[in-house]
Image (tube, rainbow, N blue to C red):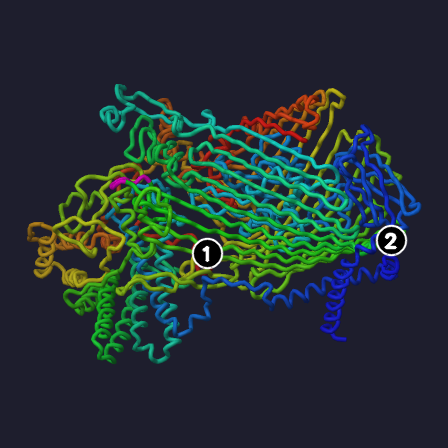
C-alpha cells in the first residue's frame, strides 16, 4: 500500500471517529440512566467548613462534579466498576475516598487539608489529558484575581498581574490612565516578532493590540483594558515554549489565560462592589527648573516678568507643572454587580460594571461599561455546554504628550523659569500653556464582544471531547478633533494633525476593527493499562484567524465650532489599512501516569500559518515533561514536609512573523502631473519568501513543596530558553529602492534564570494570622548570534542609545561620553567645546534582570486584614531624557549652580553625550497598601451575608537612586518592543481608594 | 449502551492506542499540506501589487508616474535639507535629529539625513527599474518611447542630486561610488533621455507630442550641463547649456491633493510656527529674489527666525509683492537661466560674464559693478546663490567651491543655539544602507 493510500485511510478513520463521536453525543442522554450515582459533601478537615471551590472526580474516569455552596455534590453516570472518588480544590491537598455502589447509589464524605502547593488543582492552560497540576511537568502560575481585587485598588488586568507572577515583567508606558503596558515573560526571546504573550479568555484567543487611538506620539491604548477584572476568577500564566508547545507557532513568548467566573450549584448569590478614589502626580516627583538673572532678562520685563527687580546673577526657581490648571487629582469611581447560581444541570454568572477613571491630565480619562454572562447547561452526565458572552464599551481620552513639542510636560520641563513665552505658550511653558494643551481632544471608543461556546462530550467514561468556538470582535472608533481657530491663532502644529492644517478646524475619524476567530478541538482517551499505570492519549486541532482592518477619514475646514462631522468639512481625505493572518495546527499527546505520582508526557504539534514564507509549509514542535510527586513514595520520610513534587519539562514553540512580512510587494501612491493628480507606483515591502517562525526551545526544572502542615511553601523553577531562527529586522539598503527593514531568520537568543516563590504563615492563631510571600526572579538575556558577521544594530529615539549586539542583552543601553585628556582633564576643541568620544560604553540591559516582590497579609480577629506589597526591580538602565534635555537647556541646578565645576557644566550641556543620563533604573515601590474590614452586619443578615470595607493605596512610595522621578516609564508606549526612554510622559501616579463589597 | 462500547474499545492494546495517537500527527501533517493549498490559510493584501504584475503593459503609466512622484518628493526634501546643510537656511526645532543635522554635526543614524537619502535612492532605483520594465514591455519600441525618455531624465536628476549632496553613495546595493561617479552616471542617463526623446520626436508630427519630447530634451540638457559643471568638465557643460532655448523652465509640481504632494518647504517655512529661518548670510539683502518678512517669527524652539518667503525660482514669485511658500507652490528645477550661468562660468571672467552678472544684479535691485578676474567670478557665485535660493543648487555649489579652495560653508556659532557648527559638509550614507548592503 502506498503512503498516500495509507494516509488517506487514516484520514478516513479519523473523520469516521469524529462522526461517531458527534452521533454518539446525540445518544448520550438516554444512556445516562444505566449507571450509578454518588452523593456526598466536601469539608475542610480543620474547620469543618464546606470547601466551596472543590471538584470531585471518579478515579479512573473523567466523570465528576463541582460542589455547591454547602460543599455538597452529586455525581451521576458512575460506572459500576468505579471504586474511588477524589476531591480537589485550589489551596487544598487532594482527598480520596473509597465507595461501593449499592443499588446504584453511594454516599461519600470527604475532608480536605489546606495546602498552598495545591497539587491537584486543575490547570487549564497548555494542558490536556490529566490536567491536575501534579501531572504537569512545567510551572504554571495562577493568580487568584478575586483575592487580589479584594485587597487592592487595581484598575485593569495589568495592575492585577503586577508583581504577582515571577518571570512576568511588566513595563508600563505611562501613568496616564488608559495606556498600555509592555509584557515580557522570561525575558525577550525575539527581536521582531514581539515578546508579548498570547492572551486567551476562557479558551478564546483575544486581541491585545491597541484600541486604535490616533497618534499621541508615544502612548497607546490597550484592548486588554476592556476586560473587567471583577469578572475574572483567575489568571494562569505559562511562561515559555516548554509549557506552550500545544499553542504552536504563536506561543513562544508564553500564554496568559484569563478564566472568568462561573456559577455554582446552589442559591443565587449576589455580589456588589462600589469603589471611589483619586490619583495624583506628587509634587515631589516634579523637578525644579532654575534661571539666572542676566541684564537682558531683567530689562525684558514683558518677556521675562519673573526677573523684574532682580540683580544680575540672582537665581530664580520654579517647580514645573504646579500651576493650578496644569494637573488635577484624577477621580475614580467603579460600580460592579454580579449574580451567580445554578443547579446540577445548569449554572450561570452574570455581571455588569461601570468604571470611570480620570488621569492627572485634565484631558485624560478611561471609562468602561461591561456586561458578561457565563452560562453552562448540562443536559446529561456525558454532555455539557458552556457559553461565555462578554460585551464591553471602552472609552479613553489621551493627552498630547510624549515625543511632541506640544505636550504639556516638555513644555514645562524645558521652560526657563520666569520667562513668558508667546502664545500658545505662556509663563513657565515654552511651547504650550495648560489652558491650550488641555483642549487637545483625542478620544477612542470601542465596542468589544468576546463570545465563546464550548461543548464537552464524554461518550464513554474513558473518552472526553471538547469543541470550542470563539470570537473576539472589537469595533473601534477613534476621533481627533481641533475646533476652528480665530485668524492668526494656531495653538497646535500641523504635526499634531498628520501634517494637515488644523487652524480652520480638523476632524479625523478612524474605524479600527479586529476580529479573532478560534476553533478548537481536544480529545483525550483514558486507559488503565494496569493497576498502577494509566494512559491519557490526546489529539487536538486549532484554527485561528485574525483580521484587522481600519479606515480613516480626515476633514479640514469645519466651518464652525461644534461641527464634528467629516461630511461637513470643506476638504476631506481618507486612508485604509488591512492585515490578515491564519493558522492551523494539530497535536497529539501521550501522558503516562504511574501510581498517580509519576507522570511522563510527550507531545508534538504541527503548524502552518499564512505568515510563513512560500517556501515553508509546516513546522513541528515537540515537547516532553516529567512530574514526580516524590513525597507520596513510601521511602519519603523527610520530617515536616507535607509534599514535594519534582518537575522537568522540555519543549518548543514558535513565534510567527507578521501577516504580510514574507511578501515582496509594491503599492500605489499619488503624483502631481500638469493635468492633475494621478496614481503612481511605489515600492512597498521587500519581503522574504524563506520566512519561517522563530523556534523557541526551553528546558525548565523545578520543584514545589509544602511543609509544616501547609504553613510553608516553596515553588522553585530554573529555565533555560533559546530562540533559534530569530527574526531579525535587517535593514533593507535604500539603494535597492525599498526601505525600512525586512525580516530574516538569523539570530539566536538566550534567556535563563530562576523563579522562586516562598510563602509562609509564621503566625496562625484564631485572633491573628500573618501570611507572607516572597517572589524572586532573575533573567539573563543575551543575543547569542546574529547568524552572520554583521555589525551591531544601533537604535534609539533621541540618541544612539540602544543596541542589538552579540554577547549583550537585546536592546541593551549604550552611552557615549566626552573625551578626556590623559591627565583626566576635559578635552576641548578650538571653540572650547567638549568632543565626543567615538567609543560607545555598555551600560546595562534595558529590562530588569532581577525582580522581587514581598507581600504580607495580617488578619486580625477574623474581621480585619492588612495587606502590603513591595515591588523591586533592578539590573536595568533607563535613558533619562528629561534631565538630559534640561541639562542641555541649562535649567537644572547642576548647570546653574554658581559653584558648579564649569567643565562639568559644559559636559552636561553638550548635546551628544549620554553617559551622564543613561542611569541605573533600580527601584523599590510600595505598590499596594490596604486595610479591609468585615463590617458587623448581624442586624442585616436578612439582606447581606458579608460586607467588606477596604481602604487601599497604589504606588504610594518609590525608593530609587535614578535621577528622574520614576524609571518605570517609557514614552514609546506599552507596545514598544525595546525602545526605552523616560521622556515626556506622566510617571506612575499615586492612587487612593475606598471600596465597599457586599455579598447577599 | 455504555458497557459493550467500552469493552470493544478496551480490547485495543495500549500499543495500538498509542500508535493510533501517533498516527494522528501524520494525518494532521497531511491535512496541513492539503490545507496549504486550500482557502483555509489564504490571505491577501488588497493594498499591494506583486512584482510579477509589473510586466503588464497596462501599468506603463503607473510605473512612469511612480518615478516622477518619487522625484517630486525627493527633490523637495533635498531642497529643504540641502539648504540647511549649506548656508541658505537654519532650523529652530526641538527635535534632536533635526537639531544635530542643522548643526552640521550628525552621524549616520540621523533620521533627517536618512530621509533625504531614502527618497533620492527610491527615485533613482524606481527610474532604473522602470527603464528595464518598459524595455521589457515595449521591446524595440522602447528606443523611441517618450515614457522611457522620461524615466531616464528623472532618474538622471536623482543621480545628480546624490552626486552633488552626498559624500558618496552606492547604487542598487553596490559598493559606494564617489560623487563624480554618480554625476557621470547621471550624465549618461541624460544622454539616453535625449537620444530616446529625439527619436520619439522624429517619429511624430503631433504638436503636443513634439512639445513633450522637447521638454524632456531641454530638461536633460540643463541637467547634463549642471552635472558636467559639477565634475569640472566646463566644455561639455557649456555644450549642453548652449542647447537650452531661452525661456525654458521645468517645474517640479506640488499640489494640495495629498500630504505627499505638498511642497515640503511649506511646512517649515510657513509664517505660523515655522522652524526654518533664512541664514544670516542671506538675510537683510533687500533682494526681491530671496525675500524675507519684515519681522521675525518665533521658531518651534521659541527663538526669533525669519522664515523664507517665496524666492525667485518658485512659481508665482513676484518682485513687487511678498509671497509665501504654499503647499501648492511649484519649484523650477531646470531653466534657461541656469544654462546661462553654466555658460558664464565656463566662459570665465569675460565681458559677457560681467554683462550677465550686472543683468542679474539689476533683478536684485543692485547697482552694476565693474569687476574682473576672481572678483567677477566671486560675484557670479553670489548672484547664482541669490537666483537659485532654496532650489537644491547651493550645497553642490558649496562643495565644488570647497574643492577649489573656497570655503563658504557656515562656521562658528549657530544662529540661535549656544552650540557651534560642526564639520559635516555633505549628506552621508545612513547606517541602514551600511548595515544592509553587503558591498558596503
The outermost residue toward the front is A942
**Quarter of the image where the C terminus of chain B is located:** bottom left
Residue of label 1: A577
Residue sticking out furthest to the right: A102
**Few, some or many residues within 10 Å of mark 2 (<14, 14–19, 20+):** some
User: Is A279 displayed left or right of B98 in the figure?
Assistant: right
Q: Is residue A626 left or right of residue A804?
A: right
**Residue A694 locus on image (x, y percent):** 60, 55
Along the line of sight, the residue nearer the viewer: B334 or B87: B334
Seen at 67% across and 37% down, the residue is: A144
**Res B174 visible:** no
Crowd tier of the residue under label 1, counting other residues whose Cα lies within 10 Å: few below 14, some 14–19, many 20 or above: few
Q: Chain of mark 2?
A: A
**Residue A696 at least partly seen:** yes
Report the magenta residues as a range. A486-491
Is residue B272 covered in magenta?
no
User: Measured from the top left, where is residue B112 in percent x and y?
Assistant: 36, 49
Sooner in the amino-acid sequence: mark 1 or mark 2: 2
Expressed as whole percent of the image width and height from the top left, the position of residue B84 reads 28, 48
Amino acid at each position: 500500500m502506498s503512503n498516500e493510500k495509507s494516509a488517506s485511510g487514516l484520514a478516513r478513520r479519523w473523520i469516521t471517529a469524529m462522526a461517531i463521536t458527534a452521533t454518539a453525543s446525540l445518544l448520550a442522554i438516554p444512556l445516562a440512566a444505566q449507571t450509578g450515582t454518588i452523593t456526598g459533601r466536601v469539608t475542610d478537615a480543620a474547620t469543618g467548613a464546606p470547601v466551596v471551590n472543590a471538584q470531585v472526580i471518579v478515579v479512573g474516569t473523567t466523570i465528576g462534579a463541582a460542589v455547591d455552596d454547602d460543599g455538597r455534590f452529586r455525581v451521576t453516570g458512575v460506572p459500576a466498576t468505579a471504586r474511588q472518588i477524589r476531591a480537589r480544590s485550589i489551596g487544598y491537598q487532594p482527598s480520596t475516598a473509597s465507595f461501593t455502589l449499592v443499588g446504584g447509589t453511594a454516599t461519600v464524605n470527604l475532608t480536605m487539608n489546606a495546602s498552598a502547593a495545591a497539587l491537584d488543582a486543575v490547570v487549564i492552560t497548555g494542558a490536556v489529558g490529566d490536567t491536575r497540576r501534579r501531572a504537569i511537568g512545567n510551572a504554571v502560575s495562577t493568580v487568584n484575581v478575586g483575592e487580589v481585587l479584594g485587597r487592592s485598588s487595581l484598575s485593569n488586568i495589568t495592575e492585577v498581574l503586577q508583581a504577582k507572577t515571577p518571570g512576568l515583567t511588566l513595563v508600563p508606558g505611562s501613568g496616564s490612565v488608559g495606556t498600555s503596558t509592555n509584557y515580557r515573560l522570561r525575558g525577550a526571546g525575539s527581536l521582531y516578532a514581539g515578546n508579548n504573550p498570547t492572551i486567551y479568555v476562557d479558551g478564546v484567543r483575544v486581541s491585545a493590540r491597541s484600541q486604535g487611538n490616533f497618534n499621541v506620539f508615544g502612548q497607546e491604548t490597550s484592548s486588554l483594558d476592556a476586560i473587567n477584572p471583577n469578572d475574572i476568577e483567575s489568571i494562569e500564566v505559562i511562561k515559555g515554549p516548554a509549557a506552550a508547545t500545544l499553542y504552536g507557532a504563536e506561543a513562544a513568548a508564553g500564554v496568559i489565560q484569563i478564566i472568568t467566573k462561573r456559577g455554582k450549584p446552589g442559591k443565587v448569590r449576589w455580589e456588589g462592589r462600589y469603589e471611589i478614589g483619586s490619583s495624583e502626580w506628587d509634587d515631589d516627583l516634579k523637578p525644579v527648573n532654575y534661571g539666572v538673572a542676566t541684564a537682558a532678562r531683567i530689562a525684558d520685563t514683558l518677556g521675562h516678568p519673573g526677573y523684574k527687580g532682580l540683580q544680575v546673577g540672582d537665581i530664580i526657581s520654579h517647580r514645573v507643572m504646579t500651576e493650578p490648571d496644569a494637573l488635577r487629582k484624577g477621580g475614580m469611581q467603579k460600580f460592579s454587580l454580579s449574580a451567580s447560581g445554578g443547579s446540577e444541570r445548569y449554572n450561570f454568572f452574570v455581571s455588569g460594571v461601570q468604571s470611570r477613571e480620570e488621569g492627572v491630565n485634565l484631558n485624560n480619562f478611561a471609562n468602561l461599561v461591561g456586561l458578561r454572562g457565563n452560562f453552562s447547561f448540562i443536559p446529561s452526565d456525558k454532555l455539557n455546554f458552556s457559553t461565555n458572552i462578554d460585551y464591553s464599551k471602552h472609552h479613553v481620552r489621551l493627552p498630547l504628550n510624549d515625543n511632541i513639542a506640544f505636550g504639556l510636560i516638555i513644555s514645562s520641563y524645558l521652560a526657563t523659569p520666569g520667562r513668558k513665552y508667546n502664545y500658545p505658550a505662556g509663563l513657565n511653558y515654552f511651547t504650550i500653556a495648560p489652558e491650550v494643551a488641555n483642549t487637545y481632544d483625542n478620544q477612542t471608543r470601542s465596542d468589544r464582544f468576546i463570545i465563546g461556546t464550548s461543548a464537552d462530550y464524554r461518550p464513554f467514561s474513558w473518552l472526553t471531547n471538547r469543541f470550542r468556538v470563539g470570537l473576539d470582535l472589537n469595533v473601534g472608533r477613534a476621533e481627533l478633533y481641533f475646533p476652528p481657530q480665530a485668524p492668526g491663532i494656531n495653538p497646535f502644529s500641523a504635526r499634531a494633525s498628520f501634517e494637515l492644517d488644523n487652524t480652520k478646524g480638523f476632524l479625523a475619524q478612524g474605524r479600527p476593527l479586529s476580529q479573532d476567530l478560534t476553533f478548537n478541538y481536544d480529545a483525550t482517551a483514558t486507559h488503565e493499562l494496569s493497576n498502577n499505570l494509566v494512559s491519557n492519549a490526546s489529539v487536538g486541532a486549532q484554527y485561528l484567524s485574525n483580521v484587522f482592518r481600519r479606515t480613516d477619514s480626515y476633514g479640514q475646514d469645519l466651518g464652525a465650532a461644534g461641527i464634528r462631522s467629516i461630511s461637513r468639512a470643506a476638504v476631506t481625505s481618507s486612508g485604509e489599512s488591512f492585515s490578515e493572518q491564519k493558522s492551523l495546527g494539530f497535536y497529539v499527546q501521550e501522558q503516562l501516569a504511574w501510581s498517580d505520582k509519576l507522570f511522563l508526557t510527550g507531545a508534538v504539534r504541527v503548524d502552518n500559518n499564512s505568515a510563513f514564507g512560500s517556501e515553508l509549509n509546516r513546522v513541528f514542535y515537540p515537547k516532553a515533561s516529567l512530574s514526580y510527586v516524590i513525597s507520596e513514595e513510601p521511602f519519603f520520610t523527610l520530617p515536616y514536609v507535607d509534599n514535594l513534587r519534582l518537575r522537568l519539562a522540555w519543549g518548543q514553540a514558535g513565534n510567527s512573523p507578521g501577516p504580510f512580512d514574507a511578501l515582496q510587494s509594491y503599492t500605489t501612491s499619488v503624483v502631481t502631473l500638469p493635468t492633475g493628480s494621478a496614481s503612481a507606483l511605489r515600492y512597498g515591502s521587500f519581503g522574504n519568501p524563506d520566512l519561517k517562525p522563530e523556534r523557541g526551545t526551553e528546558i525548565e526544572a523545578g520543584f514545589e513543596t509544602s511543609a509544616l502542615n501547609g504553613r510553608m511553601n516553596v515553588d522553585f523553577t530554573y529555565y533555560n530558553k533559546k530562540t533559534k531562527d530569530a527574526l531579525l529586522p535587517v535593514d533593507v539598503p535604500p539603494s535597492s529602492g525599498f526601505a525600512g527593514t525586512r525580516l530574516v531568520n538569523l539570530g539566536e537568543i538566550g534567556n535563563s534564570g530562576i523563579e522562586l516563590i516562598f510563602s509562609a504563615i509564621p503566625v496562625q492563631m484564631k485572633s491573628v494570622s500573618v501570611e507572607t510571600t516572597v517572589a524572586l526572579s532573575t533573567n539573563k538575556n543575551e543575543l547569542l548570534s546574529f547568524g552572520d558577521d554583521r555589525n551591531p544594530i544601533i537604535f534609539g529615539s533621541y540618541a544612539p542609545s540602544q543596541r542589538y549586539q552579540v554577547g549583550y542583552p537585546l536592546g541593551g543601553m549604550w552611552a557615549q561620553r566626552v573625551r578626556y585628556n590623559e591627565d583626566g582633564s576635559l578635552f576641548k576643541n578650538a571653540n572650547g567645546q567638549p568632543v565626543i568620544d567615538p567609543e560607545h560604553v555598555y551600560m546595562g540591559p534595558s529590562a530588569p534582570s532581577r525582580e522581587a516582590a514581598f507581600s504580607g497579609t495580617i488578619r486580625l480577629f477574623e474581621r480585619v486584614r492588612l495587606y502590603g506589597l513591595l515591588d523591586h526591580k533592578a539590573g536595568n538602565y533607563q535613558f533619562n531624557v528629561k534631565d538630559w534635555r534640561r541639562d542641555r537647556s541649562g535649567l537644572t541646578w547642576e548647570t546653574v549652580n554658581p559653584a558648579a565645576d564649569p567643565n562639568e557644566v559644559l559636559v552636561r550641556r553638550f548635546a551628544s553625550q549620554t553617559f551622564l543620563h543613561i542611569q541605573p533604573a533600580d527601584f523599590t515601590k510600595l505598590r499596594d497598601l490596604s486595610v479591609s474590614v468585615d463590617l458587623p452586619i448581624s442586624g442585616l443578615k436578612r439582606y447581606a451575608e458579608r460586607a467588606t470595607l477596604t481602604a487601599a493605596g497604589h504606588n504610594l512610595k518609590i525608593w530609587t537612586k535614578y535621577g528622574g522621578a520614576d524609571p518605570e516609564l517609557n514614552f514609546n508606549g506599552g507596545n514598544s518592543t525595546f525602545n526605552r526612554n523616560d521622556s515626556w510622559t506622566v510617571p506612575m501616579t499615586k492612587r487612593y481608594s475606598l471600596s465597599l463589597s457586599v455579598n447577599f | 449502551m455504555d458497557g459493550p462500547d467500552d469493552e470493544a474499545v478496551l480490547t485495543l492494546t495500549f500499543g495500538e492506542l498509542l500508535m493510533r495517537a501517533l498516527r494522528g500527527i501524520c494525518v494532521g501533517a497531511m491535512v496541513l499540506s492539503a490545507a496549504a493549498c486550500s482557502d483555509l490559510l489564504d490571505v491577501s493584501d488588497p493594498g499591494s501589487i506583486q512584482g510579477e504584475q509589473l510586466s503588464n503593459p497596462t501599468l506603463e503609466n503607473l510605473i512612469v508616474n511612480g518615478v516622477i512622484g518619487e522625484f517630486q518628493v525627493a527633490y523637495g526634501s533635498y531642497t529643504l535639507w540641502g539648504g540647511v546643510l549649506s548656508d541658505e537656511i537654519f532650523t529652530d526645532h526641538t527635535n534632536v535629529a533635526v537639531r544635530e543635522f542643522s548643526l552640521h554635526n550628525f552621524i549616520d543614524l540621523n533620521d533627517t539625513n536618512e530621509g533625504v537619502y531614502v527618497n533620492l535612492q527610491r527615485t533613482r532605483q524606481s527610474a532604473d527599474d522602470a527603464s528595464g520594465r518598459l524595455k521589457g514591455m515595449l521591446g524595440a519600441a522602447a528606443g523611441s518611447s517618450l515614457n522611457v525618455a522620461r524615466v531616464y531624465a528623472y532618474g538622471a536628476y536623482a543621480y545628480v542630486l546624490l552626486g552633488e549632496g552626498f559624500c558618496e553613495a552606492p547604487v542598487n546595493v553596490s559598493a559606494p561610488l564617489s560623487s563624480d561617479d554618480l554625476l557621470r552616471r547621471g550624465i549618461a542617463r541624460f544622454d539616453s533621455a535625449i537620444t530616446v526623446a529625439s527619436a520619439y520626436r522624429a517619429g511624430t508630427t503631433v504638436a503636443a507630442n513634439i512639445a513633450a519630447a522637447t521638454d524632456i530634451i531641454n530638461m536633460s540638457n540643463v541637467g547634463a550641463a549642471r552635472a558636467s559643471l559639477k565634475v569640472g568638465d566646463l566644455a561639455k557643460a557649456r555644450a549642453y547649456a548652449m542647447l537650452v532655448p531661452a525661456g525654458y523652465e521645468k517645474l517640479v509640481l506640488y499640489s494640495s491633493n495629498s500630504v505627499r504632494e505638498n511642497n515640503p518647504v511649506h511646512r517649515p517655512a510657513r509664517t505660523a510656527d515655522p522652524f526654518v529661518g533664512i541664514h544670516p548670510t542671506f538675510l537683510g539683502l533687500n533682494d526681491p529674489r530671496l525675500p524675507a518678512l519684515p519681522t521675525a517669527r518665533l521658531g518651534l524652539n521659541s527663538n526669533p527666525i525669519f522664515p523664507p518667503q517665496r524666492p525667485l525660482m518658485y512659481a508665482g514669485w513676484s518682485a513687487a509683492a511678498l509671497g509665501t511658500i504654499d503647499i501648492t507652490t511649484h519649484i523650477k528645477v531646470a531653466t534657461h537661466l541656469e544654462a546661462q550661468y553654466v555658460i558664464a562660468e565656463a566662459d570665465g571672467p569675460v565681458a559677457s560674464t560681467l554683462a550677465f552678472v550686472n543683468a542679474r544684479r539689476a533683478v536684485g535691485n543692485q547697482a552694476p559693478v565693474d569687476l574682473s578676474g576672481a572678483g567677477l567670478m566671486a560675484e557670479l557665485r553670489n548672484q547664482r546663490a541669490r537666483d537659485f535660493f532654496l532650489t537644491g543648487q547651493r550645497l553642490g555649489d558649496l562643495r565644488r567651491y570647497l574643492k577649489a579652495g573656497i570655503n563658504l560653508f557656515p562656521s562658528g556659532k549657530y544662529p540661535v543655539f549656544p552650540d557651534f557648527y560642526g564639520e559635516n559638509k555633505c549628506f552621508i550614507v545612513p547606517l541602514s544602507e551600511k548595515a544592509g548592503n553587503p558591498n558596503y
